[in-house]
Image: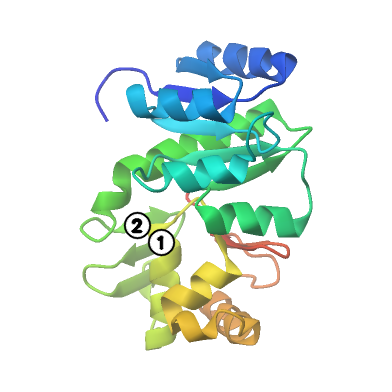
Amino acid sequence: MNDAPARILIIEDEQPIRRLLRISLESHGYQVAEATTAAAGLQQAISQPPDAVVLDLGLPDQDGLQVINRIREWSRVPIIVLSARGRESDKIVALDAGADDYLTKPFSVGELLARVRVALRHASTVSEAIDSPFQVGGLIADLGRRQVFVDHQEVRLTPTEYRLLAVLVRHAGRVVTHRQLLREVWGPDSVFENQYLRVYMGQLRRKIESDPARPRYLRTELGVGYRLMDE
């Protein structure tokens, strides 16, 4: 990214929340644009492409899921959903539609700012994921050389364990849904085989976590999927 401040587009119809988001984001150096409807948000996303979008699902003219689907037709801009819909099924649908992250109202401003930082960092480095080793704490995953190290010791992974970790590395910091992991690792015919995922995630944790029962790197998003921490 260049030296210009990142531009965040807020698509949210509740004025108090928009005001809180604007103040919080601007105080951390971001440029902020606002829209109160899906139509206005899509128009802004097209005419002045943002670096990230913070999106409410309950918009007055369209469901926010339609906004995600429309944006994903032409852009990979990070989309962070901010919604009162807190059911696991709502999160899964939004993430499968192409959202990068999901926060439930009421939310912590500090957590939102952290998710924005992660989304922007992921967007700026995703093209380098294969060329540059991924590192967080004592974990290093070099996808180019197909090598994984934990605390300077090389870890031997099976081909399936490696593919699973590679998908998580490419989406580091983001929630990756069960269905997305199953599709990318095992193929489209396996999207409902959650047992595959549980077994291999358990094996992967035993190899890279010092305490698999309290994982530092591979976090579970209950009922939704997994997140590889990147900070």
Residue at x 42%, y 47% (from the top left corner)? 72
- Colour convention of the picture: rainbow
Mark 2 and mark 1 residues within 8 Å of each other at the beta carbon: yes
* Left or right: where 142 falls relative to 231: left
Is residue 150 visible in the rendered image? The answer is no
| Residue at (43% x, 82% y) in the render | 187
| Label whose residue precedes the other's in the sequence (2 or 1) | 2
- Residue 80 in picture, x, y percent from top left: 56, 39
Q: Eyeballing the image, is 194 above or below 30? A: below
Question: Which residue is labeled 2 in the image?
Answer: 134
2 vs 1, front mark: 1
| Horizontal side, residue 71 vs residue 60: left or right | left
Amino acid carrying label 2: it is: Phe
- Check the picture and name the quadrant holding the N terminus: top left
Secondary structure category for the residue under label 1: helix
Q: Which residue is mark 1?
A: 169
